[in-house]
Image (cartoon, rainbow, N blue to C red):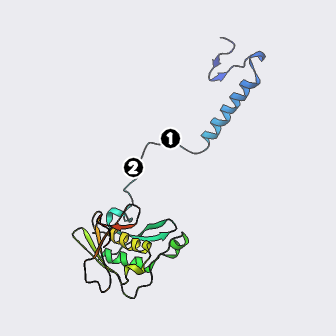
Amino acid sequence: MPRNAAVAGEIMPKSESEHTPGALCRVTAVLVAAATLAGCGITDTDARPAGQPVQGGLTQSSGSLLRVYFVTPEGTWPVSRPAASGDRLQQAMAALLAGPTAAERARGLNTRLPPATRPIRARTAEGRVELRLPWLVRDLPPVAVSQLVCTAAAAPGAGRAPVIEVFEPGMTGEPWPVRCDESGSATPAEKGGFS
């Protein structure tokens, strides 16, 4: 049998000239790593089914959320709020009037809407939203108008890119048709602008 052959699972010693410090370090490192991995308690397993996904969370597609627009130094910013059953458009308007929560204020959100003596009335009709305000538009900062228009446009049932028809108190003429643009700003719905 050759001098370096294995007998019954044992390794025969090498001659003195075959042992080098680098080889002994490599063998020691491999043995330590093998012992560590063997003792960590992790066993090899196959993939197992995880069960049913979590149910009951709020999702945009479920219609259980409202989108309400508040203000940051950069402009309007939408937040999600849970919605109860019923008229979600009117709920969104009430949430807008209530203002940001303490947590939202801590994140830098606020509102530019003044206190209202009456509620905002809103209803959807054929791809548009009628928005009846308790204030005159001229008395509101432009960003407050954007809060109103974009909150109304995002309400469930309003449709995609609806025209928001803004009515002021005592208004007898035609409403102001506006839309919420992609930046969260109120813009005229027609090219001619506001009349």
Residue 65's place in the image compared with 39, above or below, is: below
- The part of the image, by quadrant, that contains residue 37 is top right
Can you give x and y, in whole percent of width and height, for residue 127 in the image?
24, 67
Residue 53's place in the image compared with 106, above or below, is: above
Can you give x and y, in whole percent of width and height, for residue 25 in the image?
73, 29
- The residue lying at 50 percent from left, 65 percent from top is 74
Amino acid beneath label 1: Asp
Locate residue 183 relative to residue 170 in the image: left or right: right
Which residue is disc 1 drawn over?
Answer: 44
- The residue lying at 62 percent from left, 42 percent from top is 39
Residue farthest to the bottom? 117
- The residue lying at 55 percent from left, 72 percent from top is 106
Residue 49: mark in rendering: 2
Can you give x and y, in whole percent of width and height, for residue 165 in the image?
28, 74
Q: Earlier in the sequence, mark 1 or mark 2?
A: 1
Task: Check disc 2 and report its element: helix, strand or loop.
Answer: loop
Amino acid beneath label 2: Pro
The foreground one among 30 and 114 is 114
For the residue carrying disc 2, how many other residues have a C-alpha within 10 Å: few (<14), some (14-19), or many (20+)? few
Locate residue 91 relative to residue 74 in the image: left or right: left
Can residue 85 be seen from the camera position used here?
A: no
Residue 6's place in the image compared with 72, above or below, is: above
